[in-house]
Image (spheres, rainbow, N blue to C red):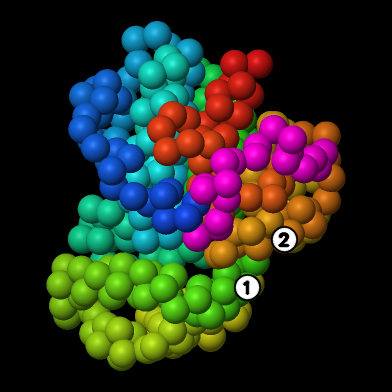
Amino acid sequence: MTQTDDLHYIPPRHLRPAFVQTMLAGMSLRKRGRGAMDEAAKPLVLDCGDGVRTTGMLSENPKGRGTVLVLHGWLGHVESTYVVSTSRYLFDQGFSILRINLLDHGDTLNLNPKAYHAAHFDEVFNAIAHATGLAPHGPVSLLGFSLGGNFALRVARHLKRDPLPDMARVFAISPVVHPAVVGEKIDAAPLIRRYFRRKLHRTFRSKQSAFPDLYDMTPLIAQPTITGATEAFMQRYGDYPDAITYFNSYALGVEDLKGCPVPVMAIGSLDDPIVPGADLGALAKDPNLEIILTRHGGHNGFFQSLRGPTFYDELILRRLSA
């Protein structure tokens, strides 16, 4: 089922520009202070299979309404602003929260010698399976943002042949559908490209520092674009011959989400400066798939005001409470 939800989400005029929405999503002021979720948070290590590990933060809620597993976006981590903000909101509504670091993100760069990337799906699925087993309360839902949204939708697709019995719902916010297009859009926007290059260089340097005998990231850091850095990474350390083959390896096909065994809700905006909302809208319809496209919202934004929950916060809560 596909719907356009402009009647329900019309931000005030000063919040309508896509760049404003996108910048607000990552502003650290949104997560200032500490909430009940932060006080309850306990670190844990998740098994990704074959000795590979990642980390997470579990906040158990005594109200026990269910557990939400949360995946951040590319070059983010469990303390990313949008992750913390939504996790706090859902925790305050009675849900336990387990935030998961994707491989080679956050504090995981020194955990595993191998360099990991978005095409390493099996390891992330294994971590999610482990996290599902650790969930203090059912039902369990999975929520992903941007690249994490891509992983969440790939998990939903994978459940067709490898079900997780406790997984009840999947949510994706501004999910990446065609990674090659996303790379082009980032490289075409100087401010966004500079933002991601700075974070990517920090990641490259941290991986080299953790395993100096394995990595020399200097040629990658010298690349002026994200696509160029990805090409250099694949040629030196990756599993694919070039960037486009790599990008295509984790793209979503039009029919991929047909027949998913759990309800899936994906939210995108038509003005997203990073992930084209139209790509999300092109996915084939299915009774268990709800796609919501809005005219405004930017990337991971969807602000209704400078305070209070976002449009997707409230929408997720309604689906979890149904």
Contact, CB < 8 Å: mark 2 with mark 1? yes
Nearer to the camera, 102 or 126: 102
Disc 1 marks a residue whose amino acid type is Val
SS at badge 1: helix
Q: Is residue 111 left or right of residue 252?
A: left
Q: Please name the residue shown 39% across and 88% down the image.
A: 224
Counting from the top left corner in percent of width and height, residue 156 is at: 64, 42
Position above or below: 3 against 262: below
For this orientation, the residue located farthest to the front is 13
Residue at the top extreme of this rendering: 63
The residue that disc 2 covers is 279
Instruction: Using the rendered view, name the quadrant where residue 179 is placed.
Output: bottom right
Q: Is residue 154 visible in the rendered structure shown here?
A: no
Image mark for residue 288: none
Reply yes or no: does residue 4 show up in magenta: yes
Q: Which residues are magenta?
A: 1-19
In the rendered image, residue 145, in percent from the top left (x then y), is placed at: 50, 48
How packed mark 1 is, by other alpha carbons closer than 10 Å (few <14, some 14-19, many 20 or more), is some
